[in-house]
Amino acid sequence: MSQGAFLSRIKSKKPLLADGAMGTLLHTRGIPIDAAFDELNLTRPELVLDIHRAYIEAGADLIETNTFGANRFKLAEQGLELRVKDVVSAGVALAKRAVAETEREVFIAGSVGPLGVSIQPYGRIKAEDARAAFAEQIGALAEGGVDLIILETFTNLHEIQEALAAAREVAPQLPIVAEMTFTPDDRTIMGYLPGRVAHELKEAGADVIGVNCSGGPAQIARILQAMHQAEPDALFSAMPNAGLPENVHGRTMYPAGGDYFADYALTFGALGANIVGGCCGTTPEHIAAMRLALDDVGRPVPPITFLEEVEETNGDSSPYQSELADKLARGKFIIGVEMSPPRSHSLGPLLTSAEMLRNSGADVINVPDSPTARMRMSPWAVCNLIQTRVGMESILHFPTRGRNLLRIQGDLLGAHAMGLRNLFVCMGDPTKIGDYPDAMDNYDISPSALIQVIKQRLNRGIDQAGNAIGLPTSFTIGCALNMGAQNSDKEIDLLIRKLDNGADFALSQPVFEPERARQFLRRYAEIRGEPLHLPILMGVMPLYSLRHAQFLHNEIPGIDIPPDILKRIENAGEDADREGVTIASELIQQMRDVIHGTYIIPPFGKYDLAAQVIDAMGVSA
């Protein structure tokens, strides 16, 4: 059928009826729920064909190809990443065969789901690689002869936008239905509200905007209303799950029956849906019940609870900024000292040490989060108590590892509410090296991307999804920098990304070779065409003993200690710690013309060494 035929049909008064779940029926036919359903197009085609027939016989006007996960990333799990076209072509052929055998006019939609991997800025897959994977799958669907493309069950708005762009590039003649799924609070997993999703999908070029999967029909009705309020002139689709799943004797079961879906077929139509159907847990019985309801002109629409329209605001002016931000703006040389949280609930010795460092002339205390992946007190508590009891600002180290984006944003709001304004955004140490090597180590977002979320979202009064958070936050953000990196160009590329995303300053790895650091800065100027203007707080680590120096040099990535410094520590013997302080102060002095401060990392909690370095620099620092 032609593109015009499909769009003309869905604009008619009666909603077009789509099919229901594919995976649910395959599961009832003995296929494990975690199996690769797309591969069955090649290995068990009769199962897929039989399900297509059942939905057409139930009255579906549209069926979807069994190609939801037929992209190179998901198929790689079965070693089929080079057979995307084969799997997709077989899926289209089976749908066409089912339509031909039933002798009904039925539209065939090419089903496209998420890639199953995270794309930048929340993962490692580049946007262009994601778009290429979608283009490969959608191109094969178009070549096979589908009538339209349906993008379904997407949780990430940015990912579905890449899929839309790919579809417009490789199959501009095909209509596109773009459906997202929502969490129980009627937001996407990234926090986007339905109205925002509808607006973004329409702007991206979707012909039909939709919601699928999610919870049951009641939630879909709420989301559909909100979408329709935001884009009243758009075309919409609604394809809910058969309620929330439950495990019964080892099988995944869904509670909502056909009669319930029949009522909601009419409800969805009354709320503006042009396409209705089912998702997980729905069967030909559900579709048959919806068919009867849609064809019964005398059947009343069930009562509908209409939502009130909600207007969102982006808050007022920003709260106060930190003293650190003010000092950086004035060009003051900053002295920071790292203090690790204790492995107990007692903070007495640490607070006493913080007072000593304050009196020595330190500007700020840096508090890492679970350094070397060891269990320690919450760094938030340490930062808060240092600020309230010692009267000294802190920099909270904020790693992305082990946190999802939802938790990250909540943690940031909590930190801001506690008065913490300075953050050092980093990756964090892998859990495998610490006390709990099997602890969750995943993350949704890279440090450079989190800098963007904070500076360009939270500091402007909105969350990552564009929803208002009330007053904007006022975080000052530090990023990691390794001026001794083996691949300086790669490090510079990463640094530029952090700069462009809004970093306010950098904390560097400990520097033991000033000339190497200067070479890095010269190389940056060559690549960027201008000197680095980002304030650098150069890391210095007072060496405590020869054994300490050898350990750092041989076992800590990114730290290289030159032979002459190792020799000085060795010759110092029992006075190695004093020599380490001297070396540290010399390194700071040698780099003083190109850095904006220092970040002292005392070994083994020996904060007196940090105070000695500050003393050696002079109070005028």
Image (spheres, helix red, strand yellow):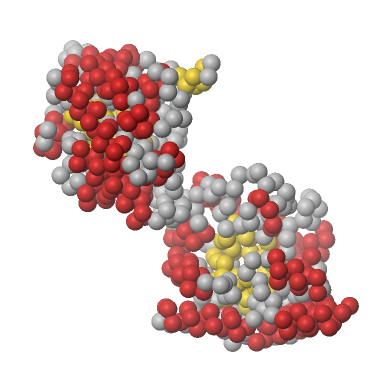
563 or 332, which is in the foreground? 563
User: Could you tell me which residue is drawn at 89 percent across and 78 percent down?
Assistant: 574
- Say if residue 212 shows up in the picture: no
Task: Give the image quarter of residue 226.
Answer: top left
Q: Residue furthest right?
A: 574
How far across and down, in percent of the image, does residue 274 sit? 21, 30
Q: Position of residue 178 (x, y in %)?
A: 28, 40
Question: Is the residue 117 above or below the residue 124 in the image?
Answer: above
Q: Residue at x 66, y 56 (%)?
A: 369
In the image, is residue 350 above or below residue 611?
Answer: above
Q: Position of residue 344 (x, y in %)?
A: 79, 51
Q: In the rendered view, would you say 146 is above or below 546?
A: above
Residue drawn at x 38%, y 41% as measured from the top left: 80
In which image quadrant can residue 218 be found?
top left
Compared across the picture, whether 138 is left or right of 397 comes to left
Quadrant of the drawing holding the N terminus: top left
- Which is nearer the eye, 120 or 561? 561
Callout count: 0
Say left or right for 499 vs 241: right
* Residue drawn at 52 percent across, 72 percent down: 487
Quadrant of the drawing holding the C terminus: bottom right
Residue 167 visible to an observer of this rendering: yes
Q: Nearer the viewer, residue 475 or 205?
A: 205
Q: Quadrant of residue 578?
A: bottom right
Q: Is residue 99 left or right of residue 510?
A: left
Q: Position of residue 76 (x, y in %)?
A: 42, 43
Q: Is residue 285 left or right of residue 247?
A: left
